[in-house]
Image (cartoon, coloured by chain):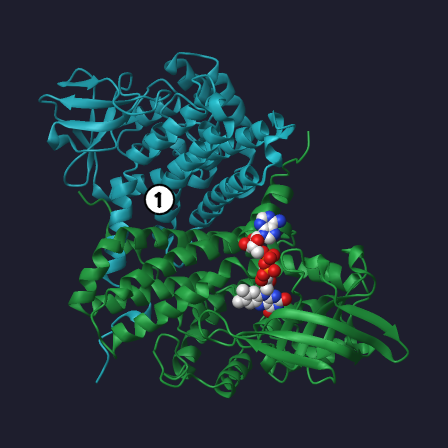
Chain colours: A green, B cyan
């Protein structure tokens, strides 16, 4: 006896005027070349991606919550969520400038001077400045406050010396959100200072690192006697870092807010592609219970994300609660990616069409997903945060 | 009425009522205690003595029941009082007042001559049974049906099998009414499991901080800290999922409800299992209530036919999609 009508278990397109507008715009502007659900002989170029991202902002779908005076659209987190649901449903490329839009921008809004806001914020949205995040160092990963990059007071500003690593997108960036220290490494949390460093400043040296997916997605960045002005400092020493920590907790919860919906569309793509071919459908069938499980997890992820959006709306602190969606998403997405990769590996040999496209996409996702439990705080660090700051578990009698 | 009330206002009353119920061995007395606290009619219409509140107001009540190991078919009472009110107001009223202990046989259908998953079946009268056409009927005791002792795990709310020998259920709900009842049941069950799971986590977190081994509390060890963090994530996931399902999101209220129920059915028991591990040998004892929570949550998963639910979802996923990018992947040309 089947107690459930399958038709009732569908997700209709998101409601709302913003969603409808975004849906139409994306359908008209996301060309085949930009679609991430197609295998491309020559992938979209950086210039093409930048142009698309600029147009996305001009159409009203980036900088959604930023004030209008800085080229933002002046809307709230709910509208941001509404639009991001649509972005997630479509096979859109990930933002080239997500560090600018989701990390640097909110920090500048929180601690920047009026002059900094006016100069830096519009440049992010118009794609004049792509940003990278210079936090991690060879000796400071999970233990970020072990960082050693030094900022010394000099007559005409600050002198920077040190090395960053795993800096995503550094080779295509115009600005680096750099975390350095004014004192000694032993000072740990004290004396940390944030800068907006122009990547073309003399003494900045970038070397790309190849990642497991064959891409050159992150870099080492060396700072050798780089001179920056006071006007490049974001907040006072300590103040900038404290603000950054607050912003980071919000960002962990809300960045790439479209993730659950993108995740769902990846699953829908896999199933739809298999439906288009009798042999692939045969491969898929035995995995359906596992995939239904994943479908449940996607729905639960939406709950975790939307809970935090509601908290933001009421002005509550996000604090350590951002760890919940990060942890849940990264692990569920890896589970999906592993199953998907197993499925496409059993496809008949085809070189084009829906099966070839979905195979390429799922293989990319599988490899890329391995980083999801590492960046933005590893799984182990998220679990530490929950134990310490949510469960308050004691360490000594 | 719902406008000037907050569901959390029921939390304290519910907790106190569960504690009172734990103090009496007689299920009928528990029914009276719950009724006196006004809890059995929270979502029933005013005409049968209920408060006529939306389902979200019943959530604190079932959560407290899950946390408090309630030995009363509360979910069944809440559902029957609400859904039978239009067809049998007298019975619905008696349930609200705690005078009648009614229950629901959750699995199987009457035409098969035996139905299962009937909480407190040895006491319950009448019993709602499902019919093959999707509707449901009522059976009274002694009318050609009898209950067999429990085959399930739950000891606080033992399940029975009801054998039907010639009994003809009195048809009370059509298929649409049953679907509505099941939709409410999914939410109430998920809430019950959330309450039980949160209680298991709280017990385990407390124990881990009290128990000293190797000269330090168990909670000093990262493996156990991480285990408890994962359990906290699982509880939070159910909590957030339930809040979302109760808000009936425009993008799919049915899937939101189904998902949180299926998630609770799976992760709830796993949280109890985890807590038993944290307690060590103590966790394996009859006196530590973790096994009772485990049993209750497993029983909920069975009554709610969670496995069937996953398969139905798989079917829906396979059938088609509402995402226009993937509606039809037979490429043109
Ligand atoms: C694709 C990608 C992009 C990135 N982009 C950026 C970027 O743009 N900017 C930037 O600043 N950084 C970036 N990072 C760096 C990222 O933040 C770090 O990799 C991460 O913080 C982990 O640090 P680590 O690599 O030094 O690993 P480590 O800290 O050395 O950790 C190694 C392993 O040990 C575990 N571990 C560490 N400490 C503990 C502990 N106390 N208890 C238990 N286990 C522990 C970790 O969980 C991990 O499994 C990126 C990383 C990746 C993979």
Residue B255, percent from left and from top: 35, 52
Of the 4 image quadrants, the one containing the N terminus of chain A is top left
Ligand number 1: quarter of image: bottom right
Provide the residue designation for mark 1.
Answer: B262
Left or right of A132? Residue B305 is left
* For residue B70, above or below residue A169: above
What residue is drawn where x is 45% and y is 67%? A368
Asked if one can make out residue A123 in the rendered structure from this viewpoint, the answer is: yes
Residue A305, percent from left and from top: 51, 56
The answer to which quarter of the image holds residue B88 is top left
Report in which chain the residue with disc 1 lies: B
The answer to which quarter of the image holds residue A2 is top left
What residue is drawn where x is 49% and y is 83%? A49
Left or right of B13? Residue B322 is left
Asked if one can make out residue B322 in the rendered structure from this viewpoint, the answer is: no
What residue is drawn where x is 30% and y is 41%? B306
């Amino acid at each position: 006896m089947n107690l459930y009508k399958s038709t009732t278990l569908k997700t209709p397109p998101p409601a709302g005027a913003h969603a409808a507008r975004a849906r139409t715009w994306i359908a008209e502007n996301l060309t085949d070349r930009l679609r991430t659900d197609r295998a491309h002989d020559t992938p979209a170029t950086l210039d093409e991606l930048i142009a698309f991202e600029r147009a996305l902002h001009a159409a009203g779908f980036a900088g959604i919550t930023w004030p209008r005076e800085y080229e933002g659209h002046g809307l709230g987190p709910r509208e941001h969520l509404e639009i991001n649901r649509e972005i997630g449903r479509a096979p859109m490329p990930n933002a080239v400038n997500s560090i600018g839009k989701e990390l640097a921008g909110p920090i500048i809004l929180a601690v920047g001077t009026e002059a900094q806001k006016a100069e830096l914020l519009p440049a992010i949205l118009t794609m004049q400045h792509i940003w990278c995040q210079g936090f991690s160092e060879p000796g400071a990963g999970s233990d970020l406050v072990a960082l050693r990059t030094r900022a010394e007071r000099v007559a005409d500003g600050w002198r920077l010396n040190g090395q960053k690593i795993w800096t995503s997108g550094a080779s295509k960036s115009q600005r680096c959100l750099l975390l350095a220290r004014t004192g000694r490494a032993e000072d740990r949390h004290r004396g940390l200072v944030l800068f907006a460093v122009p990547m073309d400043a003399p003494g900045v040296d970038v070397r790309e690192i190849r990642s497991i997916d064959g891409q050159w997605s992150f870099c080492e960045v060396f700072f050798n006697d780089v001179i920056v002005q006071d006007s490049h400092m974001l907040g006072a020493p300590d103040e900038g870092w404290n603000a950054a920590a607050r912003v980071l907790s919000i960002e962990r919860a809300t960045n790439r807010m479209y993730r659950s919906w993108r995740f769902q569309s990846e699953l829908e793509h896999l199933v739809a592609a298999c439906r288009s071919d009798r042999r692939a459908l045969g491969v898929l069938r035995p995995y359906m219970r596992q995939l239904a499980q994943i479908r449940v997890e996607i729905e639960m992820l939406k709950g975790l994300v939307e809970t935090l959006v509601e908290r933001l709306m009421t002005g509550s602190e996000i604090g350590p609660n951002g760890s919940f969606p990060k942890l849940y998403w990264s692990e569920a997405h890896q589970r999906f990616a592993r199953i998907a990769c197993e499925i496409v590996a059993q496809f008949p040999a085809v070189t084009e069409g829906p099966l070839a496209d979905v195979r390429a996409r799922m293989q990319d996702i599988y490899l890329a997903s391995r980083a999801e439990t590492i960046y933005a705080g590893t799984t182990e660090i998220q679990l530490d945060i929950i134990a310490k700051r949510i469960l308050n578990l004691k360490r000594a009698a | 009425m719902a406008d000037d009330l907050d569901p959390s206002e029921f939390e304290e009353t519910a907790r106190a009522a569960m504690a009172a119920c734990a103090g009496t061995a007689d299920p009928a007395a528990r029914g009276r205690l719950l009724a006196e606290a006004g809890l059995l009619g929270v979502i029933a219409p005013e005409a049968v003595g209920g408060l006529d509140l939306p389902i979200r107001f019943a959530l604190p009540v079932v959560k407290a029941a899950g946390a408090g190991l309630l030995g009363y078919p509360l979910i069944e009472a809440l559902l029957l009082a609400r859904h039978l009110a239009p067809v049998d107001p007298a019975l619905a009223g008696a349930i609200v007042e705690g005078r009648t202990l009614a229950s629901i046989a959750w699995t199987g259908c009457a035409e098969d001559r035996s139905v299962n998953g009937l909480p407190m079946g040895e006491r319950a009268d009448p019993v709602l049974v499902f019919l093959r056409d999707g509707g449901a009927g009522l059976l009274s005791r002694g009318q050609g049906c009898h209950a067999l002792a429990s085959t399930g795990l739950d000891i606080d709310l033992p399940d029975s099998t009801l054998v039907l020998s010639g009994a003809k259920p009195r048809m009370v709900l059509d298929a649409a009414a049953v679907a509505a009842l099941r939709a409410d049941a999914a939410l109430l069950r998920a809430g019950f499991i959330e309450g039980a799971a949160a209680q298991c986590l709280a017990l385990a977190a407390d124990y881990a901080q009290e128990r000293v081994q190797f000269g330090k509390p168990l909670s000093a060890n990262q493996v156990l800290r991480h285990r408890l963090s994962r359990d906290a994530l699982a509880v939070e996931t159910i909590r957030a999922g339930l809040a979302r399902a109760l808000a009936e999101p425009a993008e799919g209220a049915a899937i939101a409800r189904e998902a949180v129920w299926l998630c609770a059915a799976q992760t709830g028991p796993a949280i109890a299992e985890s807590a038993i591990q944290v307690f060590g040998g103590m966790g394996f004892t009859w006196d530590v209530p973790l096994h009772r929570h485990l049993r209750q949550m497993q029983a909920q998963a069975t009554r709610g036919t969670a496995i069937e639910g996953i398969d139905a979802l798989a079917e829906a996923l396979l059938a088609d999609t509402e995402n226009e990018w993937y509606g039809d992947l037979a490429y043109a040309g």
